Image (tube, rainbow, N blue to C red):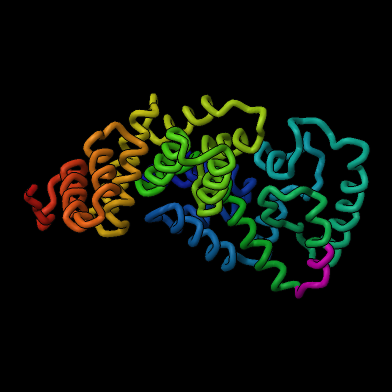
Amino acid sequence: MRSIGDLNELDRDAFAAEMAPLFEGAPTFLASLAAARPFESDDDLFDSARAVARELPAEAQVELLDAHPRIGADPVAISPHSRQEQGYDGHEPPADDQAWIGNELEALNDAYESRFGFRFVVFVAGRPRAEIIPILERALHADPEEERRRGLDDVVLIAADRMRTERGPEPLREELREAIALEVSRFMVGELDREGLLRATHRLIEEGVESPALLAASRAAEDDGSALDVPIAGLMSEIGLGGWDGSQAGQLLALHAAASVIGEVSQPIDGARRIAAVSEHPEFRELVSRWDADPERREALDDDIRRAAAELFGPLDGVPEHAEE
């Protein structure tokens, strides 16, 4: 799929041809959308598409809705996008034990089109076809104008989802890459067990991280019989850390702990214990040992830990200097 800048530069016919798979054709709508250019972003394109669809004459709105295939249509007769969205496996027809779903959808589609005069369109969003049946049943009782607007809005949602699919996942933001690196590194040094890694991947996915490699690692962690080295290597490679090993993982966690000490997020001794546990920094092991052995000098040793953390992480003004007695 071309960039938004390239789409703006195309002539009207070329633009319509480029966008047609996203909207299943609908030439009147596509001509109007082409005339609405330029767009500043993908979001602006689909905001404009929604406005254009709502402002079309009724006949053109029906053309746009009817361009989409029925839910439950013969998979051989529909576009690759629709086939994937409706959950068909390649070109194979549904299994016999699923035939009732197709029969029910056919009857409901007939009733819907008879009532409203246009095709039922809904953003399936990966839901099984069986879950569409109650949605279609409820739609039969909707106000005709409201149902038309809903269908047109869903046409745009479908197109936006198709564009995201064709573009592939967006590059992860820096803070998300860092979050993945930290959680994987915790697993690599033993701070997280398999269950902990699984919870971490679930949390990241719930927070909206869109990463095929993260999903693969999560599924592997969920299966006790699956090795994790390959999916973890794939995940780290996806975020630009190919070849990441335990030593690098420990150093990253040590830097993170040092930053927590410097920023006063954690107590100096807690940060020192973590740095000593996850990395090869003997000065922190020595500081922890002295802190444990000499309660009377802990305040002074906290200053030493802060200074050592600053040296590990980088220069920092205002870290108290402590002179050894």
Q: Position of residue 145 (x, y in %)?
A: 71, 73
Residue in view at x 69 percent, y 39 percent: 84
In the image as oriented, which residue stretches furthest toward the bottom?
143
Left or right: 270 in relation to 214: left
Q: Quadrant of residue 83?
A: top right
Tag count: 0
Between residue 212 and residue 225, name the one nearer to us.
225
Q: Quadrant of residue 283?
A: top left
Q: Position of residue 105 (x, y in %)?
A: 86, 52
Residue 230, visible in the rendered structure = yes
Residue extent of the magenta highlight: 137-143
Left or right: 48 in relation to 245: right
Does 188 lie within the magenta span?
Answer: no
- The answer to whether 281 is drawn above or below residue 297 in the figure is above
Does 141 lie within the magenta span?
Answer: yes
Q: Quadrant of residue 274?
A: top left
